[in-house]
Image (cartoon, rainbow, N blue to C red):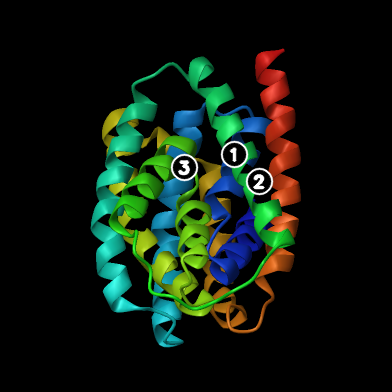
C-alpha cells in the first residue's frame, strides 16, 4: 500500500489526476471494500497528500490563484453532496455504477493521451466544472483530477499551472468530503491500508511537483488509462455477473 500510494501520488502530482481513481479501484476491485468505505479511506489519505502536494506546487510557483478561487468553493460543495449521496445508498447497488464511471475515466484518459495538443486560451467554464468534479470525486472515490484537469486543458489553460492549481484546490474538497464521510460512517474510514497509502503519498508529493515541470503528460495519461480501463471493466464484469 505504501508503494501504491507513492506511485499514485507521483502520477497525480505530475499530471493532476489519478490518485483517487487508482487507489479506489484497488480497494474496491481487489480487496472488495464497499464503495462508500473505499472513497472515505481515499479521501482521508488525500487530506494529507493534497496538503503536501499543494505546498510543493506553491513552492514551485505552479498555482494560478485566480483560477484556484473559482474552483475551490464549488468543488467543496460538490464533494459534500457526493459523499452524502454515496453513503445514503446500498453498496451493492453503487458498485457497478462506480466501476462504470472509473472505466469511463480510463477510456477518456486514453483518448486524451492519443491526441494530446495544447493551445493557450482563457477558460470560460470553471465553477460548474468544480461542482461536477467535486461531486464525482466523492461519489466515485476519485475523479477531481481527471474531470477538472482534463477539461481545463481542453479549454486551453497552461498544463503546469493547471496541474498545480487543481492539486492545491483538491485539499479543500477532500477535507470536506472526509468530514462528511466520517460523520456518516464513523472512524471506519481508517485502516492499515489507509496509513500505507498515506505514507507513500506524502513521500511522493514533493517529488511529483518537481516532475510536473519535466514529465510528458500524454505518456503518463496513457499508462493510467490502460490500468484504470482494464481493472474497472473487469470489476464491472464481476459486479454484473
SS at circle 2: helix
Residue in the image at 70% along x and 61% along y: 113
Circle 2 sits on which residue? 106
Work out whether residue 190 can be spotted: no
Q: Looking at the image, is 148 positioned above or below residue 177? A: below
Element on which disc 3 rests: helix
Q: How many labels does the image show?
A: 3
In the figure, is residue 21 to the left or right of 229?
left
Q: What residue lies at 51% left-to-right and 47% top-to-bottom?
A: 194
**Rendering coords of residue 34 (x, y %):** 52, 26
Element under disc 1: helix
Residue 48 seen in the current view: yes
Location of residue 187 by image quarter: top left
Residue at the outermost bottom position: 60
Q: Name the residue under label 3.
A: 41
Q: Quadrant of the C terminus?
A: top right
- Which-is-in-front pick, marks 3 and 2? 2
Q: How crowded is mark 1: few (under 14 residues within 10 Å), some or many (20 or more)?
A: many
Badge 3 density bin: few <14, some 14–19, many ≥20, Cα 10 Å: many
Q: Do the residues labelled 2 and 1 touch (CB within 8 Å)?
A: yes
Where is mark 1, residue-wise? Answer: 102
Where's residue 200, x and y in %? 59, 61
Amino acid at each position: 500500500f505504501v508503494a501504491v500510494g507513492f506511485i499514485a501520488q507521483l502520477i497525480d502530482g505530475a499530471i493532476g489526476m489519478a490518485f483517487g481513481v487508482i487507489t479506489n479501484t484497488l480497494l474496491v476491485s481487489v480487496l472488495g471494500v464497499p464503495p462508500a468505505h473505499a472513497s472515505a479511506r481515499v479521501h482521508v489519505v488525500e487530506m494529507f497528500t493534497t496538503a503536501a502536494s499543494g505546498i510543493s506546487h506553491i513552492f514551485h510557483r505552479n498555482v494560478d490563484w485566480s483560477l484556484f478561487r473559482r474552483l475551490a468553493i464549488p468543488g467543496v460543495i460538490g464533494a459534500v453532496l457526493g459523499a452524502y449521496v454515496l453513503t445514503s445508498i446500498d453498496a451493492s447497488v453503487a458498485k457497478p455504477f462506480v466501476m462504470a464511471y472509473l472505466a469511463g475515466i480510463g477510456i477518456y484518459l486514453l483518448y486524451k493521451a492519443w491526441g494530446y495538443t495544447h493551445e493557450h486560451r482563457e477558460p470560460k467554464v470553471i465553477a460548474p466544472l468544480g461542482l461536477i468534479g467535486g461531486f464525482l470525486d466523492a461519489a466515485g472515490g476519485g475523479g477531481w483530477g481527471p474531470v477538472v484537469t482534463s477539461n481545463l486543458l481542453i479549454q486551453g489553460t497552461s498544463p503546469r499551472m493547471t496541474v498545480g492549481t487543481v492539486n492545491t484546490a483538491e485539499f479543500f474538497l477532500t477535507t470536506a468530503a472526509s468530514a462528511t464521510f466520517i460523520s456518516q460512517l464513523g472512524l471506519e474510514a481508517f485502516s492499515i491500508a489507509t496509513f500505507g497509502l498515506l505514507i507513500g503519498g506524502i513521500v511522493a508529493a514533493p517529488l511529483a511537483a518537481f516532475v510536473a515541470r519535466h514529465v510528458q503528460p500524454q505518456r503518463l495519461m496513457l499508462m493510467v488509462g490502460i490500468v484504470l480501463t482494464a481493472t474497472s471493466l473487469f470489476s464491472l464484469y464481476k459486479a454484473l455477473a
